[in-house]
Amino acid sequence: MLEGRVGRLSWRASQPFGAEVEGDLSQPLTPEEAACLRKVFYDHELIIARGQTLTLEQQQTLAGHIGPVLAGGRGMEYVSPDDGVLNEAALTFHSDLAFAPEPFQALSLHAVDVAENRTSTRFANAHRAYERMRDGLKGRIAGMKAISMSVDLGPVRATPHEVPANSIHQTWNVVRTHPVTGRKFLYVSESHTVQIVGLSHEASEDLLHTLFEELYADDNRIEHVWRNGDFLLWDNLAIQHGRPDLMGVRPRRLQRAAVAEHSLVEQLPDFFDRAAAGAPMGA
Ligand SMILES: [Fe+2]
């Protein structure tokens, strides 16, 4: 479906992916509206609602329609250029916590105080990339595995091929099946994937760059330019995110809610002792 209305909510599909939702999301949703939000979320993988005024608790309640939310200080609640985590860095495309056992299920950002039209978050659709891929390439990567590792995030891909024994990493099928929708999606990213298992460095990089061309094609990505009141909610498996640098952009305060059973530290208690760099938790 390309558009619809349930109760106080209406929505319309956007191109090349995502959906715009209209309605006051600060008010509790009826069961029918909540079911609509959930369906639009999984059908379109990225929801954009403008003109919202949401407290952190209201944002957490909304994200809670998708799954358990990291509330009560268990997750990062604001992203800003001065947050001491990612600061002003440009970030290549990634899925939050791809290097951990349980990457986040969904992420939400809400612009509470931003310099309007001066800063953005980018999204690429990993499910659509797989769906559009030619059969020969699908056959080539079937059954392959790739390693995602916690590395320095920045404006360009800068991953080693080697995987040190003490590094924080996770091995994934290159093509994963979404646990809710059953759709197949690519689970490699320019930020975190260091190698395709069993290939030489050169062959691994060649294949990864072929996949990145599919993932990050101009017609498979969108750039959301922030205005105050924007509320975004996206599937952290089907959709990857990144951003240009934030040099000179002030303010850029985005209120954040993450959908996950377990936080980064709950999954990896020694993460901040072992990690060489901050975890990619915002954008
Ligand atoms: Fe992130």
Image (spheres, rainbow, N blue to C red):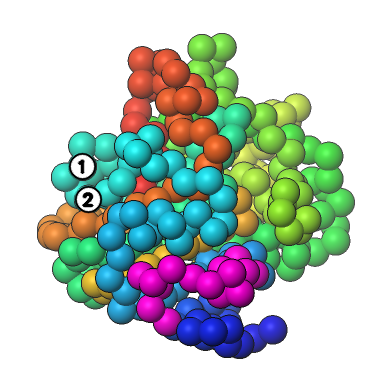
Range shown magenta: 23-40
Please tell me which residue is depicted at 75% across the width and 65% down the height of the picture. Answer: 131
As rendered, which of 229 and 225 lies closer to the eye? 229
On screen, residue 54 versus residue 37, left or right, reads left
On screen, residue 278 versus residue 148, left or right, reads left
The location of residue 210, given as percent across then percent down, is: 66, 53
Q: Residue flagged by tag 1: what amino acid is it?
A: Asp
Q: Quadrant of the N terminus?
A: bottom right
On screen, residue 100 versus residue 254, left or right, reads right
Let me know if residue 45 appears in the view. Answer: yes
122 to 198, vertically: above or below: below
Q: Which residue is mark 2?
A: 80
- Look at the numbered discs 1 and 2 and tell me whether their residues touch, using CB distance below 8 Å: yes
Q: Which residue is mark 1?
A: 83
Which quadrant of the figure has residue 87? top left
Whether the residue under disc 1 has CB within 8 Å of ligand 1: no
Let me know if residue 95 appears in the view. Answer: no
Q: Residue flagged by tag 2: what amino acid is it?
A: Ser
Which quadrant of the figure has residue 201? top right
| Disc 1 secondary structure class | loop
The location of residue 234, given as percent across then percent down, is: 51, 60
The extreme top residue here reads 165
- In reply to whether residue 167 is colored magenta, the answer given is no
Please tell me which residue is depicted at 73% across the width and 59% down the height of the picture. Answer: 181
Mark 1 crowdedness (10 Å alpha carbons): few <14, some 14-19, many ≥20: few
As rendered, which of 283 and 207 lies closer to the eye? 283
As rendered, which of 257 and 141 lies closer to the eye? 257
The location of residue 95, given as percent across then percent down, is: 52, 46
| Disc 2 secondary structure class | loop
- In reply to whether residue 36 is colored magenta, the answer given is yes
